[in-house]
Amino acid sequence: MTDGKEKLGPAPLALVLALIAGALVLAVVHEPLMALLRTPRDAGGYDAGRMVFLYATLPRLAMAVLCGAGLAVAGAIMQFVLRNPLASPTTLGVEAGARVALAIATVAAPGLLGLGRDLVAISGSAITTGLVFLLVRRRGFEPVATVIAGLIVGLFCGALAALLGLVEARQMTAVFLWGSGSLSQQSWVPFSGLALRLGVALLALLPLLRALAVLQLGDDGARGLGLSVTRLRVVAIAIASTMTAFVVSMVGVIGFVGLVAPALARLAGARRLGEQLAWSALLGALILLITDAAVQLFAGQLSEFLPTGAVTAVLGSPLLLFLVRRMKPSVPPSVAAPPGWNDPPAARAPVVLAGLGLLVVVALLVGRGPTGDWSLPFGSWSAVAVWRLPRILASAAAGALLALSGVVLQRLTRNELASPEVLGVSAGALLAVALSLLIFGQLGAAGDAVTAVCGGMVVLLLILALGRRSGFAPDHMLLAGIAVSALADALVGVLTAVGDPRAMRLLGWMSGSVAGVSLQAAVLTMLAALVALIAALVLRRWLEILPLGSEAARALGVNLPWARLSLLLLAALTSTAAMPILGPVTFIGLVAPHIVMTLGLRQSRSVLYAAAGTGAAIMVGADWLARTVSFPLQLPTGLVAALLGAPALMLLLNRRGRRS
C-alpha cells in the first residue's frame, strides 16, 4: 500500500482517533455524570437530567459505536469481495431501497408504517438487493457487474424518492430526516436489538472468512482450490447487505462510514481480510462516535435534529483526503478493446445517432396543447417551437456532454463505476450553490449557473492539487472526488433535515429541470458538446492506450502525467458545461457508456459517437416525458432521465448476462 518510511499503519491512526473520541465523549458526559454521582440514590422525586443521561445520552453514544462498526464491516466485505474500492453498502442499493420503501409507504400506503417502520425499510432493502442478484445471476455474480447493477438500482431508487419528495414535500419531511441518519435514542432497547441482530450476522460470517481469504488469489485460483466462487460471493454480499439493512432500519442512512472506514484501514496498511475487517470495525466505530459526540457537544439543543449521518462526512472526508496522498496507485483490470477487435456491424454508432434524430423529430412534433390535449403543431409551428426547441436542444446537448465525460473517465481510470459525480466536480457545484443560498439567498437561474461552474472548477483544482504528487493516478482522483462529494451531500442533508425552506429550492435545482431554458443557452450548450466531442476524438489515442495499463502506455511512449491531466481536465470541463442546464444530475455519465458497451461497441471512436448519441437520446426522451406525462405539472428532467435510463440499463445488463 505504501512504502516503509511513509506507512502510517492502522494502529497509530486508530490511537489518534481514540484519543479524540475519548476527549469528546468525556466532554459530553462529564457534567451529567458528575450530577448523577452527586445525587443520592435514594433521593425522591423525578430527576429529568438523570433520565436523559441514562436513557438518551449513553444509548446514543453506544449506538454510534455499534452502527459505525456494523457499517464498516459491511463495507469491508463488499470492497473485498467485489474487488473495488468504490464499493460500499450503498453500492447494492440497500440504503436506497429502504429509503424509497419508506417514501412510497408514507405517500401511498401510510397503514404499512403501522406494521413497523423497520419491517418496511428491511423489505425495501431486500427487494433492491434481490433485484441486483437477479440482474447479475447469469454473469456468475462478477464483481464489476454486481457493483454496476447495484449502483444503477440505487440511483433509480434515489431518483424515485427525490421525485416523491418534490411532489409530496410535506409528507416527506420525516423521510428526509430519517434518510439523513439520526442516532437519537430514548432507551436501550434499540441498541440491544441491533446488537443481537448484528451478532447473529457476524456468527454467520465467521465460517466464511477462510474461504473469502482465498478470493485474493483471483476467481480462477479460488476455483482451482475447489471453491464455488459464485455461491461464496452471493452469501458474503447477502450477509453484508443484511447487516446494513439492520443498521438502516434502526437509525436511517449513514452511508459514508461504510466507504471511508475500509478505505482508511486498507490505505493505512491492513492487507489480509481479517485485519481489514477488524480495523475497519474499529475505525468505523471511532469515526461515527467522534462525529456524534461532536454533534452533541457543539450543536446543543439542535443535536436532536441535526442528522449525524450527514455530518459524518465532515470528519471522514479530510481523513480520506489525507491518506489518499499516501496511497500507492492500484492496478485495476484492463477495459480496453482486445487486439484486432472490430465493432459488430449491427451495433454501429450511426444506428444510435439515427435513433436520436428520429426521437428529436417526435419530441418536436408530438406534445400537449394549452388545454392538455395531444396535438400536432400544423398550424402553430412557430409558437410551439419557441417552447419546445430550446428544451430539446439543451437536453440533448447536456446528455451528450455527460456521456462524453463518463466515457473519458471510465477509460482513464479503468474503473467501470467512474462517472462525473464520482470525480467530485458536480458535488463542488452543488456545494457552491448550497452555500450561496445560505449566504446570499436566491440568485436566479443565471446566478445559480455561474455559481455552479465556479464551484465545480474550484473542486477540480483541489483534486488536481491532491493528485499532483501521484502523477494524477486515477484511483487517487476517484477517492478525492468521493470525499468532496460526501461533504456536499452532508450540507444538503443538514439543510433538508432541519427543515430550512431553502432546502426545497436546492432540491429543485438538484433535480435537473430544463423548464424555461433560453434558445441562446441551448445553442451555447450545443456548441460546448461539439467542442467536447472534437477534443475527445483528438485525444482518442490516449483513450485506446491508457486502459491497457501504465506499463503498456509507457512502452508506447505516452507521457502518463500529461495524458492523465489532459483527460481529467476534459472530463471535468465537459461535465461542468452541462451544469447550467441540468444542475448536478450526472447520472447519464454512468448510464450512457454502459448502454453503448452492452450494445457491443469497444473502439474509442465508435464509443464516443454512440455514447454522445445515447446520452442525448435519453435526455430528449426524459424531457418529453417530463413535460407531457403529468401535464400541466412539469417534472424535473434529470430525475425522469434517471427513472428512464436505469431500467433500460438493467434490461441490457440482463440481456448481456444471458448471452454470456
Image (cartoon, rainbow, N blue to C red):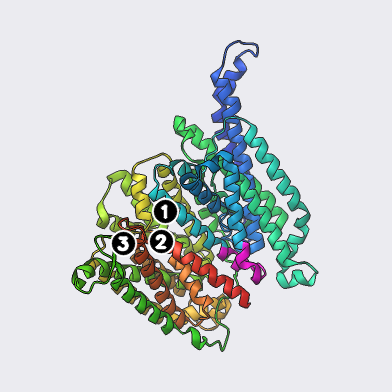
Residue located 30% across and 44% down the image: 439
Disc 1: CA contacts within 10 A as few (<14), some (14-19) or many (>=20) = many
Q: Position of residue 26 (x, y in %)?
A: 58, 30
Q: How far apart are marks 1 and 3 (CA)?
A: 15 Å
Crowdedness near tag 2: few (<14), some (14–19) or many (≥20) residues, C-alpha within 10 Å: many
Which mark is drawn over residue 514?
Answer: 3
Disc 2 residue type?
Val
Closer to viewer: mark 1 or mark 3:
1
Evaluate if marks 2 and 1 touch, with contact meaning CB atoms under 8 Å apart: yes
Lower sequence index among marks 1 and 3:
1
Residue at x-position 31% and y-position 76% = 361
Q: In the rendered structure, find residue 632 and report the number of the disc placed on it.
A: none
**Element type at marker 2?**
helix
Any part of residue 574 in sight = no
Q: Residue beneath label 1, please? A: 163
Query: What stretch of residues is rendered in magenta?
Result: 133-149
Residue under label 2, please give it. 640
